[in-house]
Image (cartoon, grey):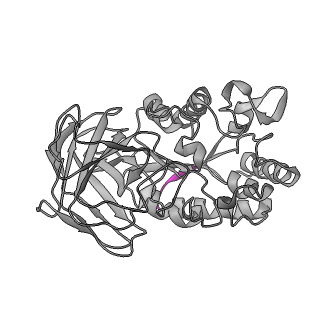
């Protein structure tokens, strides 16, 4: 039985906040990407997504490896494959022993132009590009360009035989914004280490629960099936989403925040109920996380304060989740519960730093271990 041990949620090609290759795509180039696995096994397979493509993408070759090794991947028994427009493919399983916490590289070679590439904008780790076929370049000397995004790669699965994975579903706080790039300090990384369970990070920076966005992904109520429920091996969903729905309407300074209709608490709650319905329909237990304090950030305002207080009160008291982890109280400034504790603040009064993400993971791990 294969279990998802790493995942990234696909996004539309866009300019993004940091330079990336999603709009230009790839041609006669190799792409090497690094992912940190949250589970182990003796065999692995990878999933490649072109969810937002308008034409097929040819994969001329692919390889995977750990600690300097390299193993060629096959697709339906052959060395190459085609990802259909708006589709996904999975490689054949290959013998490659991996362990939880280990980093694995996936290298793709494109001998024809891909066009714009489906990608995950904020990887907080480095992907590398080089000219020509570099599938067997184990030391990486041929890769001379770098990006902090993942392209086409949407999941890694291992024959772990486990069904106790935990999926974190959220926005930039789950994606890892504010954590140290390249250090694997997202709260998903720490949660995997603390629990020993596979953890799926289904966060997208800027994601909204109720509205699609050109930069920030499909709305949460639509993408849950693709990004979590269709992935094998998870039995628990943790929801930390909705803060951007509340806060984007508080500023006109960031055009990428649009559309940003003013929302009320009952709309956010209806979105949560839809996530709960979908997840329970697939047999998952659902944990609700209260929204973190965000006073002093560009998301804050009188209406945002009112709605966030009402939403958090519902999460705590409604009884509609199977369990609740109260991150708002945990992460709040003791002198002002509407603001992040300065010890956990990345600096924008919205995102945690490494220490803050560690605290979030510790609290969630304790809740999971004694949850029902």
Q: Is residue 281 visible?
A: no
User: In the image, 133: left or right of 276?
Assistant: left
Q: Residue 355, relative to residue 211: is it above or below? A: above
Instruction: From the viewer's side, name the closer residue of 307 and 176.
Output: 176
Q: Residue at x 64, y 34 (%)?
A: 352
- Picture coordinates of residue 131 (x, y %)? 23, 51
Question: Which of the 4 image quadrants contains residue 59?
Answer: bottom left
Q: Is residue 83 magenta?
A: no
Instruction: From the viewer's side, name the closer residue of 361 and 294.
Output: 294
Instruction: From the viewer's side, name the closer residue of 198 and 371.
Output: 198
Q: Is residue 334 visible?
A: yes
Quadrant where the C terminus is found in the figure = top right
- Picture coordinates of residue 76 (x, y %)? 15, 64
Count the marks. 0
Q: Residue at x 81, y 52 (%)?
A: 304
Instruction: From the viewer's side, name the closer residue of 360 and 122.
Output: 122
For the record, the magenta segment spans 281-286
User: In the image, 174: left or right of 63?
Assistant: right
- Residue at the extreme top: 343
- Picture coordinates of residue 342 (x, y %)? 73, 26
């Amino acid at each position: 039985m294969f279990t998802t041990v790493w995942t990234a949620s696909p996004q539309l090609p866009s300019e993004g906040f940091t330079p990336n290759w999603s709009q230009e795509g790839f041609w006669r180039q190799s792409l090497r990407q690094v992912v940190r696995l949250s589970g182990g096994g003796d065999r692995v397979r990878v999933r490649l997504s072109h969810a937002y493509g308008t034409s097929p993408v040819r994969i001329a070759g692919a390889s995977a490896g750990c600690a300097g090794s390299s193993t060629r991947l096959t697709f339906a028994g052959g060395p190459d494959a085609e990802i259909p427009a708006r589709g996904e493919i999975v490689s054949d399983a290959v013998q490659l022993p991996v362990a939880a916490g280990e980093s694995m590289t996936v290298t793709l070679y494109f001998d024809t132009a891909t066009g714009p590439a489906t990608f995950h904008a904020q990887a907080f780790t480095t992907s590398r590009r080089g000219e020509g076929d570099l599938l067997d370049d184990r030391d990486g000397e041929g890769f001379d360009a770098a990006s902090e995004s993942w392209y086409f790669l949407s999941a890694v699965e291992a024959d772990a035989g486990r069904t106790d994975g935990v999926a974190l579903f959220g926005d930039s706080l789950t994606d890892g914004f504010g954590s140290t790039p390249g250090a694997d300090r997202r709260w998903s990384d720490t949660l995997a280490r603390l629990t020993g369970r596979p953890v799926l990070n289904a966060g997208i920076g800027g994601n909204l629960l109720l509205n699609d966005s050109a930069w920030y992904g499909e709305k949460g109520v639509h993408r849950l099936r693709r990004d979590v429920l269709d992935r094998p091996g998870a039995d628990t969903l943790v929801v930390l989403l909705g803060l951007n729905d509340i806060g984007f309407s508080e500023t006109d300074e960031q055009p990428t925040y649009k559309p940003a209709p003013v929302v009320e608490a009952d709309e956010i709650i209806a979105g949560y109920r839809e996530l709960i319905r979908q997840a329970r329909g697939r047999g998952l237990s659902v944990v609700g996380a209260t929204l973190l304090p965000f006073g002093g950030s560009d998301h804050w305002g009188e209406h945002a304060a009112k709605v966030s207080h009402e939403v958090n009160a519902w999460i705590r008291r409604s009884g509609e989740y199977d369990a609740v982890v109260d991150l708002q109280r945990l992460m709040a400034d003791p002198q002002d519960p509407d603001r992040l504790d300065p010890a956990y603040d990345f600096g924008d009064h919205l995102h945690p730093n490494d220490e803050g993400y560690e605290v979030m993971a510790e609290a969630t791990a304790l809740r999971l271990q004694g949850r029902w």
